[in-house]
Amino acid sequence: MNPRFSVVIPAYNSAATLTRAIESVRAQSWPAHEIIVVDDGSADATAEVARQFGGTVRLIQQSNSGVSVARNAGAAAATGDWLAFLDADDWYAPDRIRLHAEWIAEDGRLDFLTGDYEYRDAANVLLGTSMAQHASGRAMLFKSKVANPTPAARVVMDTPAEIAAFVADHFGDTHTLSVPRARFIALGGYPTGFKVCEDVHFLTRLVAQSRRIGVVCQSLGVYAIHDGSATRRDPVAAQRENVRTLGDLMRLAIHFPLPVRQGVAVRMQSARYNLGCALTKSGQRGAAIQAVLPLLTACPSWKSLRHVLSMLRG
């Protein structure tokens, strides 16, 4: 049976980029079952842009509640059996849905799917690709070349080491994720109350209940790099929020399989180090030391000790 994809696009003050995002879905070689735009209380013409597409786009409007609530609202309204997500400032590659849909039709044992994507700046200049920039992605690229050396290579991620590495530093982003709607709903969707790392929170919970993850080793879309991101506007606040979100995930991780727990611990280690670096750069050395000290008890290792010493040195 061919999968039906509902594509959910959360949008907040996205009038300038929403048309590009929607058109990239409409141009798919495997047509989406439906496109759902969730206007998260925009003050600009976001809703009007969505309405210009008539009945080909379903528009949901809500008061400003954050991206997690918007994604969850779109998923709740979806009528397809698979969900895909796309932020309003990003866009899909033409075969993004097809490459996943054909594989799903062939192999009903895949729990969810992900893939590679490009980073591009405001001038549409290619800055790199995700899988090549992450150790877990490079491992999958190597595995795919050995298992299936074709231009559209794909590989299953299924070993404990692969899963731990993916959780620790995943290469797939929200717009490369394909997940069964029933599983998304059962997991409770994206967590609310977090402004940063909510995608990692959901993805990790999804991985914790998965055994076979499909990876398409070619670009499925574009992640737009721009100065308006929360991380670039206020690095310290963004990294604090990152640690807070991962702290909640650590609380849940006691119930996860060992490889997933290990991946979460490594990710928290990196998050605290990144917070320490952001604080150091802002001249807050004391706060930087306090940020990384918990690693000595939570993740006792030479790496944790080096992180603390690096903050002491400034």
Image: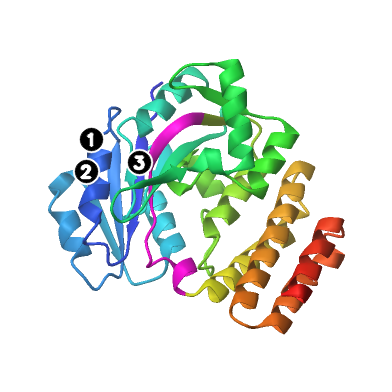
Q: Residues within 10 Å of mark 1 (few under 14, many from 20)?
A: some
> Disc 2 or disc 3, which is closer to the eye?
2
Q: Which of 197 and 116 is in front in this view?
A: 116
Q: Nearer the viewer, residue 282 or 17?
A: 282
Count of marks, rendered view: 3
Q: Name the residue under label 1.
A: 27
- Could you tell me the amino acid type at mark 1? Ala
N-terminal-most mark, 1 or 3:
3
Q: Mark 2 points at which residue?
A: 23
Please report the residue visible at 75 percent of the width from the left and 78 percent of the height from the top.
290
Spatial distance from mark 2 to mark 3, Cα to Cα?
15 Å
Q: Where residue 248 appears, x then y in whole percent? A: 67, 64
Q: Can residue 109 be seen in this view?
A: no
Q: Where the N terminus falls, by quadrant?
A: top left
Residue 43 painted magenta? no
Q: Is mark 3 on a helix, strand or loop?
A: strand
Residue 221 painted magenta? yes
Q: Where residue 28 appears, x then y in whole percent? A: 27, 33
Q: Give the range drawn in magenta.
A: 216-233
Q: Mark 3 points at which residue?
A: 6
Res. 312 image quadrant = bottom right
Q: Can residue 185 be seen in this view?
A: yes
